[in-house]
C-alpha cells in the first residue's frame, strides 16, 4: 500500500538497514496507531474537546483562537486540493516570516495530505531553486512581502506559486470544516533541509509520529507546559528548533504562542513584558544581548528559558541568572533528530553542562572506531531514540551519520561520572596547534569573561610551523578600543587566566560576526 499518491519522498528513504535503531517506542507516550495525522493531536482535538475559544496564536496586532486557526487551516486545505490541485504526497514549500498565516499553511498542507518544506525568509532564489529541485516541490505558498526572490525561481518541478493575498481571497468561499487526509503514522510529514558548507543541502525527513514524539520528549522533561503558558522566541519556523518551540510544543499542550516576524532582542523583551510570556526560546548570542538590556523590562512572568542552536557559554548562563534568577535550559538537537535530545531540568541542571539524555533518548561518547570512551574523555557524541536520521536520496551521507544503529551528530562531548554531557567542540572546530588539541569553544568561553569583549568567534588558521593557529574574531563593546595595544592586552590577559598554549595568537577586531538567521555564528566564513 502506498503512503501517498505522489510517493517520491517514501521512495527515496534510506533502506531500513541504513536507518538508526529506534528505542523507547514501546513507552505509552510514544505508541501510536497505524493510521495517524499529527494535526489531530496538535489542533483538531482541541476543538473536539471544547478548547476552541482558547487563545492559540498571539502577535503584537492580533490574537487567533484555536478555532480561528482550525477554520483557516481547513479553508486553506480546501484551496490546496480544490483550486491548486494538490495530490497527497506532494511537497509544498512555505516562504514566510513567523506569522499566523504561516502556521495555518503548515497545518493545511498536512490536513490535505501534503508534505511541508518550510524555509527561512532570508533564502535567495538560487537557494530556493536548489531546495525545490532536490525535493521536486510542486507547490509554493509565499508571503507577499517575500515575493521578489520567489518570482526569480526557475524550476521544472514547481507547478504553482501562490501568495498569501491570493490564498486569502480563495479561502473566503471555502467550508470551515475539512476531513484530514488519512495518513499513516510513518507517512512523511515534513522535510527539513540542513545546510552544509559544501555540496548540495541534505534533506531530512520526519514522520507524523516523529512530530508527536518530540512533543512527549523534551517539553515534559524540561518545561512541564500547561495550557496557561505563552511561548515566544526568535528562531524561524523553517528551523526545527523554532517549529518545535513556537508551534508544536505549545499547541500539543493547548498553550499559546506569541509570534514575532522580526524578533530583535528588544522586541522579545517587549513581548515578554507586555504579554506576560512564560517560556522563551532563543540562541546563545541573543541571550547575551538580552541580558544586557533586561533590567529595562519586567520579565517576572518568565518561568522557563531555553537555548539551543549552538552551545551556551557558562558566562552567558551566569550573567542571565545573576540578572534574573532564572536558569537557562541548554539543549542540543539537530535537524536530523528533529529537536532537542540532550538537556536538563531544574532538578538536575549543572551550570556549563548541556545536560543528560531526555526521556525518549539515550546517548554515549565513542572514539573513531565506535568504542566507548572512559569517563570525562572527549569523543564523538552518539545518540538514538524515538526519532532518527532519515536522509532522502543521500546514501553516502546516511552512512556517515548513522553508525551501528546510532546517530553520530558530528559533535565532540565528554560525559562526567554523574552522566552529564559537556560540549567540547564541533568535530570540525577542534584546533590542533603544536600537538595540542584546543577546542574553539573553550577559548571563546574565556574571552567572553573579559570586560571589554561583547562577542567573539574562534577558528583555526593553517600555519606551516604549528599546523594551526588559534585565531579570534572579536566584537568589542566600545569600537574605539580596537587597537594593537588592546590585542596585546587581551593576549597577555588570556595567558594569566587560562592555559597559555590556548591563547589566540591572531586577533581580528570586527564590528559584527557573520550569523545565520537563527543567530548561529557562521564560523566557516571566518576560516576562508
Image: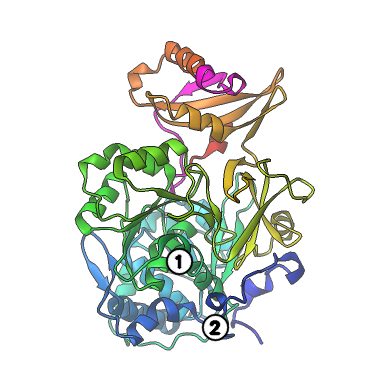
Q: Nearer the viewer, residue 241 or 171?
A: 241
* In this picture, residue 477 sits left or right of residue 13: left
Q: Position of residue 447 (x, y in %)?
A: 47, 27
The answer to whether 363 is drawn above or below residue 488 in the figure is below
Q: Quick check: is 77 in the magenta stretch?
A: no
Colouring mode (rainbow / by chain / secondary structure / one colour): rainbow
Q: Nearer the viewer, residue 197 or 321?
A: 321
Residue 373 appears in the picture as rendered: yes
Point out the frontmost of discs 2 and 1: 1
Q: Quick check: is 515 in the magenta stretch?
A: yes
Q: Give the quadrant of residue 224.
A: bottom left
Marker disc for residue 183: 2
Q: Position of residue 82 (x, y in %)?
A: 42, 85
- Check disc 1: other Cα within 10 Å, few if <14, some if 14-19, many if 20+: some
Picture quarter with the N terminus: bottom right
Count of all numbered marks drawn on residues in the image? 2
Q: Secondary structure at mark 2?
A: loop
User: What residue is drawn where x is 56% and y is 81%?
Assistant: 32
The answer to whether 497 is drawn above or below residue 121 in the figure is above
Q: Nearer the viewer, residue 271 or 109?
A: 271
Earlier sequence position, callout 2 versus callout 1? 2
The stretch of residues the image draws in magenta is 494-520
Amino acid at each position: 500500500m502506498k503512503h501517498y499518491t505522489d510517493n517520491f519522498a517514501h521512495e527515496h528513504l534510506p533502506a531500513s538497514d541504513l536507518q538508526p535503531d529506534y528505542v523507547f517506542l514501546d513507552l505509552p507516550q510514544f505508541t501510536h496507531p497505524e493510521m495517524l495525522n499529527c494535526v489531530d493531536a496538535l489542533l483538531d482535538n482541541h476543538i473536539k474537546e471544547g478548547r476552541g475559544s482558547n487563545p492559540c496564536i498571539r502577535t503584537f496586532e492580533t490574537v487567533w483562537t484555536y478555532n480561528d486557526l482550525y477554520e483557516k487551516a481547513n479553508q486553506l486545505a480546501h484551496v490546496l486540493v480544490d483550486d491548486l490541485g494538490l495530490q497527497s504526497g506532494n511537497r509544498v514549500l512555505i516562504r514566510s516570516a513567523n506569522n499566523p498565516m504561516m502556521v495555518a499553511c503548515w497545518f493545511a498542507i498536512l490536513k490535505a495530505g501534503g508534505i511541508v518544506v518550510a524555509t527561512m525568509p532570508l533564502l535567495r532564489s538560487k537557494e530556493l531553486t536548489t531546495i525545490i529541485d532536490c525535493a521536486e516541490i510542486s507547490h509554493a505558498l509565499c508571503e507577499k512581502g517575500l515575493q521578489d526572490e520567489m518570482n526569480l525561481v526557475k524550476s521544472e518541478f514547481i507547478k504553482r506559486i501562490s501568495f498569501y493575498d491570493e490564498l486569502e481571497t480563495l479561502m473566503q468561499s471555502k467550508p470551515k470544516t475539512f476531513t484530514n487526509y488519512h495518513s499513516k503514522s510513518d507517512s512523511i510529514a515534513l522535510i527539513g533541509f540542513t545546510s552544509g558548507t559544501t555540496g548540495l543541502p541534505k534533506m531530512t525527513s520526519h514522520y507524523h509520529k516523529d512530530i508527536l514524539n518530540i512533543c512527549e520528549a523534551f517539553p515534559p522533561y524540561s518545561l512541564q507546559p500547561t495550557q496557561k503558558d505563552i511561548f515566544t522566541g526568535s528562531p524561524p519556523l523553517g528551523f526545527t528548533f523554532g517549529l518545535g518551540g513556537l508551534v508544536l510544543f505549545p499547541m500539543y499542550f493547548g498553550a499559546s504562542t506569541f509570534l514575532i516576524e522580526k524578533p530583535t532582542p528588544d522586541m522579545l523583551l517587549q513581548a515578554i513584558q507586555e504579554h506576560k510570556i512564560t517560556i522563551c526560546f532563543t540562541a546563545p548570542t541573543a541571550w547575551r544581548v538580552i541580558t544586557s538590556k533586561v533590567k529595562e523590562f519586567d520579565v517576572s512572568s518568565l518561568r522557563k528559558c531555553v537555548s539551543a542552536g549552538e552551545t551556551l557559554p557558562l558566562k552567558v548562563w551566569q550573567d542571565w541568572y545573576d540578572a534574573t534568577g532564572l536558569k537557562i535550559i541548554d539543549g542540543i538537537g539537530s535537524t536530523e533528530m528533529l529537536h532537542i535530545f540532550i538537556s536538563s531540568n531544574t532538578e538536575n541542571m549543572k551550570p556549563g553542562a548541556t545536560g543528560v539524555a531526555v526521556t525518549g533518548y539515550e546517548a554515549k561518547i565513542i572514539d573513531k572506531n565506535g568504542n566507548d570512551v572512559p569517563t570525562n574523555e572527549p569523543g564523538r557524541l552518539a545518540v538514538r531514540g524515538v526519532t532518527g536520521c532519515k536522509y532522502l536520496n543521500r546514501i553516502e551521507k546516511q552512512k556517515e551519520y548513522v553508525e551501528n544503529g546510532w546517530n553520530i551528530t558530528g559533535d565532540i562531548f565528554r560525559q562526567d561520572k554523574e552522566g552529564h554531557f559537556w560540549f567540547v567542540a564541533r568535530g570540525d572546530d577542534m584546533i590542533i596547534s603544536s600537538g595540542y588539541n584546543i577546542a574553539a569553544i573553550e577559548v571563546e568561553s574565556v574571552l567572553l569573561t573579559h570586560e571589554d569583549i561583547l562577542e567573539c568567534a574562534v577558528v583555526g588558521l593553517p600555519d606551516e610551523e604549528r599546523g594551526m593557529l588559534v585565531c579570534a574574531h572579536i566584537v568589542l563593546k566600545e569600537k574605539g578600543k580596537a587597537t594593537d595595544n588592546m590585542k596585546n592586552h587581551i593576549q597577555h590577559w588570556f595567558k594569566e587566566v587560562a592555559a597559555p598554549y590556548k591563547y589566540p595568537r591572531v586577533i581580528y577586531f570586527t564590528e559584527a560576526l557573520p550569523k545565520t538567521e537563527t543567530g548561529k555564528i557562521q564560523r566557516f566564513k571566518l576560516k576562508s
